[in-house]
Image (cartoon, grey):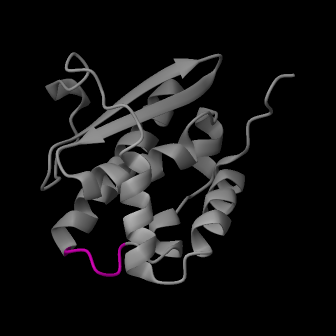
Amino acid sequence: MQKIPMSVLQTQLHITKRLSLIEDNQERLAAVVDRVRKLPPLNESERVESNRIQGCVSRVWIVAAMENERCRFRSDADSTLVRGLASLICEVYDDSTPEEIMTQEANILDVLHLTDHLSPTRRHGLDQVHRAIRDFAARAL
């Protein structure tokens, strides 16, 4: 049976429901970090300047591709915290159409209050991750 992809907002809602079960923000953030430790890192060949997100304190890479007219995203970062947060953003948009990405605004980090205690420069870097995903979708249109 083929999996039916969820929209950006459906994916955000699904992830939000699961992570909102953890009431303490610090514990929720720790769960996001723990979760990303189980994901494989990007290959060294993918950790190149053309995939690097500019404006981040940590080095962050996003690998974006089109598969069957859907956008696919994977990420990596030098910082485990940033890697966890960037991967969460990527997960929300992964397997969506470019149109969905351009018309459905996801704000999962804010909804889960994961940015509440981040520095302004860290928040700016994560905004750049979001912008890179939307820029890829705009080019794919």
Query: Quick check: 9 left or right of 57?
Result: right
Query: Quick check: 114 left or right of 46?
Result: right
- Name the spot of residue 117 as percent of width and height, x first: 28, 80
- Name the spot of residue 41 as percent of width and height, x first: 31, 32
Q: Is residue 76 magenta?
A: no
- Name the spot of residue 138 as percent of width and height, x first: 48, 35
Of residues 71 and 15, the one nearer the viewer is: 15
Give the magenta range.
Answer: 115-119
In the rendered view of the protein, which quadrant contains the C terminus?
Answer: top right
In the rendered view of the protein, which quadrant contains the N terminus?
Answer: top right
Residue positioned 35% across, 45% down in the render: 37
Q: Magenta stretch: dominant SS?
A: loop
Residue positioned 17% across, 24% down in the render: 48
- Name the spot of residue 17 as percent of width and height, x first: 67, 67
Q: Is residue 122 above or below residue 61?
A: below
Residue positioned 53% across, 74% down in the render: 111
